[in-house]
Amino acid sequence: MSGEVIGVHVSDRHAFSKQAADVITLLEGLGVEGDAHCGVTVQHRSRVRFNPAQPNLRQVHLIHAELFDHLAGRGFDVRPGDLGENITTRGLDLLDLPVGARLTIGDAVVTVTGLRNPCVQIDRFAPGLLKEVVHHDDDGRTVRLTGVMGVVSRSGTVRPGDDIVVELPSGRHYRLDKV
């Protein structure tokens, strides 16, 4: 399994969207250098209010560009960085990865921890978008399409054009859930 980075993004503010960059630096155990969500403990405001001491399992946010293609077909103009991801990918089914999958991206490694759980801010960005990115499957399970979250397992830099190589965890694989 492999894919490619088509965009990298960062924001030093707790804003919904992130700005495109030529390169981002991932810091082991912390996240994206200069990003508002970088830290050992959780940095997302709603989670900080709940428990500021919980570990940051959302250091890096990755979204597959194929989601933007799908949304365009549904009438939404969503571009890389708009939904707050740090890394936009193409050619890799992020949502099908198991917990613990290791992604070598550039010279960095990100370990996948779970799914991004989208919130109402998505509807503030584009009314009706939340219904497009969260729905229920035929078995009644909630399906979240807004990418995956991970932790930085090895520091390094990531640029558009970098390859992404997947290493699956050994043993039993566990389906991603929201983090």
Image (cartoon, rainbow, N blue to C red):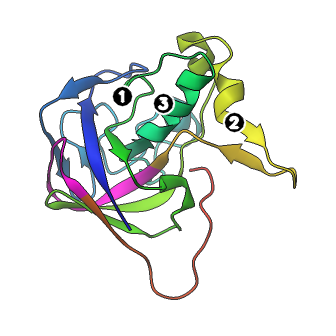
Q: Nearer the viewer, mark 3 or mark 2?
A: 3
Would residue 13 be visible to someone looking at this image?
yes
In the image shown, does 97 or 84 lie closer to the viewer?
Answer: 97
Magenta part of the chain: 149-163
Residue 154 shown in magenta: yes
Seen at 76% across and 46% down, the residue is 142
Residue 108 locus on image (x, y percent): 19, 59
**Dots 3, 1 in contact, CB < 8 A:** yes
For badge 2, the amino acid type reads Val
Give the residue drawn at x 39%, y 21%. 17
Q: Which residue is mark 3?
A: 68
User: Judging from the image, what secondary structure is the residue with disc 2 in?
Assistant: strand
Say if mark 3 contacts mark 2, CB within 8 Å: no
Dot label at residue 80:
1
Cα gap from disc 2 to disc 1, whole angstroms: 19 Å
Q: Are marks 2 and 1 in contact (CB under 8 Å)?
A: no
Residue with the mark numbered 2? 134
Left or right position of 55 against 12 = right
Q: Residues within 10 Å of mark 2 (few under 14, many from 20)?
A: some
Q: Identity of the amino acid at label 1?
A: Pro
Pointer 3 or 1: first along the chain:
3
Q: Quadrant of residue 22?
A: top left
Q: Is residue 12 visible?
A: no
Disc 1 residue crowd, few under 14, some 14–19, many 20+, Cα 10 Å: many
Which amino acid does the dot numbered 3 rest on? Phe
- Measuring from the top left, give residue 127's x and y in whole percent: 64, 11
- Image position of 160 with respect to 179: above or below: above
Q: Answer above or below: position of 139 versus 89.
A: below
Specify which label sits upstream in the sequence, 3 or 2: 3
Magenta span: helix, strand or loop, mainly?
Answer: strand
**Picture coordinates of residue 57 (x, y %)?**
44, 53
